[in-house]
Amino acid sequence: MIDRLGTSLKDALKKLAGKTVVDRVAVEELVKDLQRALLQADVNVKLVMQISQAIKTRSLEEEPPKGMSVREHVRIVYQELVRLIGSSGEVRLEPQRILMAGLQGSGKTTTTAKLARYFQRKGLKTAVICADTFRPGAYDQLSTLCGKINIPCYGDPNQTDARIIVRDGLKMLGSVEIIIIDTQGRHALEDDLIQEIVDLNLLTRATHRWLVIDAALGQQARDQAKRFHEAISIDGVIITKMDGTAKGGGALSAVSETQSGIVFIGSGETIEDLERFEPDSFISRLLGMGDLKALVERAQETVTDGEIDVNAMMRGKFTLRDMYKQLEALNKMGPLKQIMSMIPLGNVDLPGDVYDVTSAKMSRYRYIMDSMTGTELDDPSVLSSSRIQRIASGSGSSPEEVRELIKYYKNMKRALKGVRGAGGKFNMQRMMKRFGGM
């Protein structure tokens, strides 16, 4: 959903940027393209019409800020899309208890472990309680996930009363800063499920009550959020599986109409695939404007000093030696596609194979690069056919694999070149001015 919607939105803005004159006809064409993209993402028709009218009115009636051309006035699209999604939920890095709610199959248990990992990365002592007594294997699943990241997990598979489990768990984990309680889900919002979570909310005196929603629900997420909110005053929503459905836009916009802000979105299966939701950053990445703030925060959490050199990524000379250092560091930061989306690439469309770097491939690349000379690592342009044949023989690889590495290097270099402005420098001021000081 994110990829398709982002591509559609960027294509619509590209068409506007290519116009000689931005008049009513051009604006109406832009609005139609935006409507098509949003409707395909399952955003409510009423909301689509509201944002369409707002963009059309502002584009034709507002004067561009001083020093900004009419064509650069597309910041209006960014602002209105942010307004469509609404504000994000509050997340504080302080001692708290978080009660997780949601229907069965929403990804609640996995998300509980991901959330624990998020707070752990922030330096907070975190633990979870499994209060799901309905689904067989729930405790085993959660304890296994938590075990991989050294997060304490309390539960009792033989106890059928979730209230007793939570009471005992709170006693055992009293000194922990962050306690996350995973509750049971059902196929529907049954009265006994609602009553149990009401009781758990009172028992835990939860700081936050966060609802986990499957993005595939689309606009139906509104009813689910409303029912849980009426029961326990939901103050945050986590939308999962954003990478596997065309209805993600519906879920995003539906929740924004309730009294609950979105706190996180999940778009992958690994323990690291949970992102803090910020409407402006989310829309910025959809439009190819990047999210440098999130990139810096991710790097600070996962990469130690000296492992990654931002200047090397931005300077004109980017070698194979540089590339491998960056890949090793980026691999620690999370999925490469997610990280690259945080870099403001503008209208640069990256080949899909730029992101296709698995751990196995990185190992193969290491063997190949170990067979290269210092000159070849620092100046890949010298890699002739004879050199490629020698490197392949020395690394136990085929010439095709060596060429694949070279191709990948060229794609990475082209991607980084797209980040730089005129003169080979990354022009942040120009980008910020263009998009209205985002």
Image (cartoon, rainbow, N blue to C red):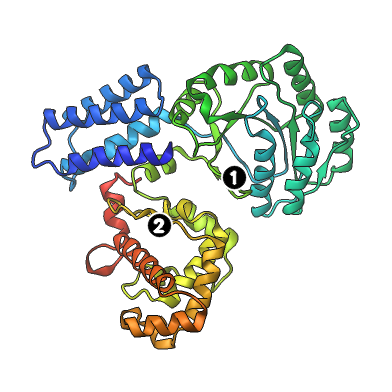
Residue hosting label 1: 269
**Viewer-nearest residue: 127 or 322:** 322
Residue 23 shows up from this direction:
yes
Q: Amino acid at mark 1?
A: Glu
Give the x, y percent position of residue 13.
Answer: 24, 40
Residue 61 shows up from this direction:
no
**Residue 287 position by quadrant:** top left
Q: CA distance from mark 1 to mark 2?
A: 20 Å
Which type of secondary structure does the marked residue at label 2 adopt? helix
Q: Name the image quarter holding the C terminus.
A: top left
Neighbourhood count class around disc 1 (C-alpha, 10 Å): few under 14, some 14–19, many 20 upward: some
Residue hosting label 2: 353
**Residue 274 position by quadrant:** top right
| Residue contact at pointers 1 and 2, CB within 8 angstroms | no
Give the x, y percent position of residue 104.
Answer: 67, 26
Q: Residue furthest left?
A: 20
Which comes sooner in the sequence, label 1 or label 2? 1
Q: Name the image quarter holding the N terminus.
A: top left
Q: Amino acid at mark 2?
A: Asp
Neighbourhood count class around disc 2 (C-alpha, 10 Å): few under 14, some 14–19, many 20 upward: few
Left-right relation of 89 to 65 = right
Give the x, y percent position of residue 100.
Answer: 69, 31
Task: Return the mark for residue 1.
Answer: none
Left-right relation of 183 to 422 = right
Residue occupying image coordinates x 18% and y 43%: 17
